[in-house]
Every structure is written in structure tokens, then in C-alpha cells.
Image (tube, rainbow, N blue to C red):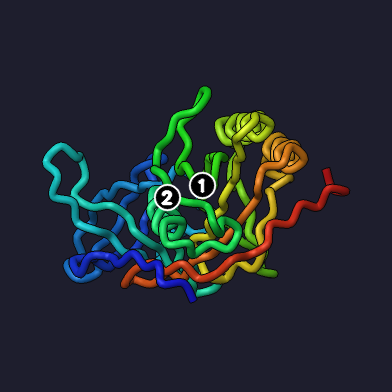
């Protein structure tokens, strides 16, 4: 088991999901007080399999006076499996940054961590690594969608921006002195392998195949999520069923 762990604050609050007025806003009922409040949802994914009325979730109070909401969503319990799932899209970047710095990811052994948020070409990439005279940009994708067999899928909605990023990574990987990688982070422990969601976004799937053929590293890991925090668990395989596309 990895030593990379990001704890949640002790001020975390238990609530019940009611509905989702828009992409970044949910309404919840705080269990202790019974108050119905609005909370920021830091994940733009569809999350329709998770955000079901009555689902238990945890919120983190926010004291920033510039924010319209006083709470942010942290994790939700999957009603079909009782697994806790992180619903904070910024967390995979933080988790992988720590893991790459500490050499905790087997696909990136011997790569030295340089920095986060590195701009190259037309985009900003989540991480920059270096090995000898070679550099690698790493793009991180959080995963929450899973089927009954434990296969995780990305994306859970059409992502033109994600497709653009993947094709850009394919071009970077062809440059002298540069490598590129896509690191999928399963924000739940019950995902055993990762596949592109071909039925949801065939363009992204085809772009991923193009990237793999261009030499882009496709890697994935999973996490154990509880109301106490998120721990990086282990590597999981990325499976591309090329005959299906």
C-alpha cells in the first residue's frame, strides 16, 4: 500500500444529497441540524450514478467570504456498492503530485518531479518530470464511473477538451527530448482496470488509441476513500480493446 495520504479536515460534515441545480452546485440536508443548504460541487462530471437523492455525502465548511456557498462537497457513498467516492476534481492532481515526488508510481520510476502546472504548446499540463536529458508532461484524469465487474470508464460525458488534450500529448511525444503520459486516477477502491468509455465518447477513445500508437504512456492507479481522507492504493491496468473501435 502506498504511503501517499491526503486527510480531510476534522470539521467535515455529514449530509444527504437532495438535487443538483447546476454543474457546480448541489443542495443537501445536513444530518445533525436538518438544515437544507447549497454546496459547491468541485467536479463537472455527470456523476449521475452517484448523485442520487438520499445518497450520503460529506461536506467541508468554507470560510472564504468571496465564495457564494459555505460548503464544498468532498465524497459521496455509492448507493449500489457502499463504496466512498471522491467528488473533488482537484484531488487527483494533488495526490499524484505527491506520489510522483515520492516515486510511488511504478510507471514513472526514475523520473524526477520538476513542477506542477507546466505550459507547453497550447495547453497547461498537470505535472512535469525529467530523466537525464528527457522531459515528460503528465496529464491527470479523475475517474468515478465503474460497472458491476469493476471496470472503470473515462469519460462519463463527452469531453471535447479531453480529446484535444490527448491529441496534443500525441504530438508532444513525437518531439525530440519529450515524452507524454496520461495518468488516470480512480477515485474509488473498487475499480480493477480502466477502459475508455467508447459508447459515451468515441472521439476520446479514438484519440487515446492515436496517443498510444504515438508512444504516450497510459497509466492508471486507484484510491481508497473514506470520510477521513484519500489514500493512493496501487497501479491498475489500462485496457484498450482495439477491435471494438
Asked if residue 240 can be seen in this view, the reply is yes
State which tag comes first along the sequence, 2 or 1. Answer: 2
Q: Where does label 2 land, which residue?
A: 93
- The percent coordinates of residue 134 (x first, y second) are 57, 40
Q: Are marks 2 and 1 in contact (CB under 8 Å)?
A: yes
How many angstroms separate mark 2 from mark 1 (CA)? 6 Å
**Which picture quadrant has residue 153?**
bottom right
Q: Secondary structure at mark 2?
A: helix
Which disc is residue 140 wearing? 1
Place residue 168 in its image quadrant: top right
Task: Name the spot of residue 126 as percent of width and height, x first.
Answer: 45, 41
For the residue pair 1 and 131, the one nearer the viewer reads as 131
Q: Is residue 29 left or right of residue 107?
A: left
Q: Residues within 10 Å of mark 2 (few under 14, many from 20)?
A: many
Quarter-of-image position of residue 58: bottom left
Q: Is residue 163 visible?
A: no
Height in image: 73 above or below 40?
Answer: below
| 155 is higher (above) or lower (below) than 226 | above
Specify the label residue 201 is tagged with. none
Residue 91: give x, y in percent of width and height: 39, 54
- Residue, far front: 132
Eyeballing the image, is 161 above or below 137? above
Q: Secondary structure at mark 1?
A: strand
Name the one closer to the observer, 61 or 101. Answer: 101
The local crowd at label 1, few if under 14, some if 14 to 19, many if 20 or more residues have their Cα within 10 Å, is many
Amino acid at each position: 500500500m502506498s504511503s501517499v495520504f491526503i486527510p480531510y479536515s476534522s470539521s467535515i460534515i455529514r449530509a444527504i444529497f437532495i438535487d443538483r441545480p447546476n454543474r457546480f452546485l448541489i443542495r443537501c440536508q445536513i444530518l445533525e441540524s436538518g438544515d437544507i443548504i447549497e454546496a459547491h460541487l468541485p467536479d463537472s462530471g455527470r456523476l449521475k450514478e452517484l448523485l442520487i437523492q438520499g445518497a450520503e455525502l460529506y461536506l467541508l465548511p468554507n470560510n472564504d467570504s468571496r465564495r457564494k456557498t459555505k460548503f464544498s462537497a468532498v465524497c459521496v457513498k455509492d448507493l449500489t456498492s457502499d463504496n466512498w467516492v471522491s467528488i473533488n476534481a482537484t484531488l487527483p492532481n494533488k495526490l499524484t503530485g505527491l506520489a510522483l515526488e515520492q516515486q510511488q508510481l511504478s510507471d514513472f520510476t526514475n523520473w524526477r518531479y520538476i513542477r506542477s502546472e507546466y505550459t507547453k504548446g497550447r495547453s497547461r499540463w498537470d505535472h512535469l518530470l525529467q530523466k537525464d536529458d528527457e522531459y515528460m508532461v503528465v496529464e491527470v484524469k479523475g475517474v468515478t464511473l465503474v460497472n458491476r465487474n469493476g471496470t472503470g470508464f473515462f469519460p462519463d460525458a463527452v469531453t471535447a477538451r479531453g480529446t484535444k488534450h490527448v491529441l496534443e500529448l500525441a504530438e508532444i511525444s513525437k518531439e525530440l527530448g519529450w515524452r507524454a503520459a496520461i495518468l488516470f486516477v480512480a477515485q474509488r477502491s473498487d475499480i480493477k482496470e480502466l477502459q475508455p468509455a467508447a459508447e459515451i465518447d468515441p472521439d476520446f477513445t479514438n484519440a487515446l488509441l492515436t496517443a498510444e500508437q504515438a508512444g504516450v504512456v497510459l497509466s492508471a492507479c486507484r484510491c481508497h476513500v473514506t470520510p477521513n481522507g484519500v489514500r493512493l492504493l496501487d497501479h491498475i491496468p489500462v485496457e484498450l480493446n482495439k477491435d471494438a473501435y
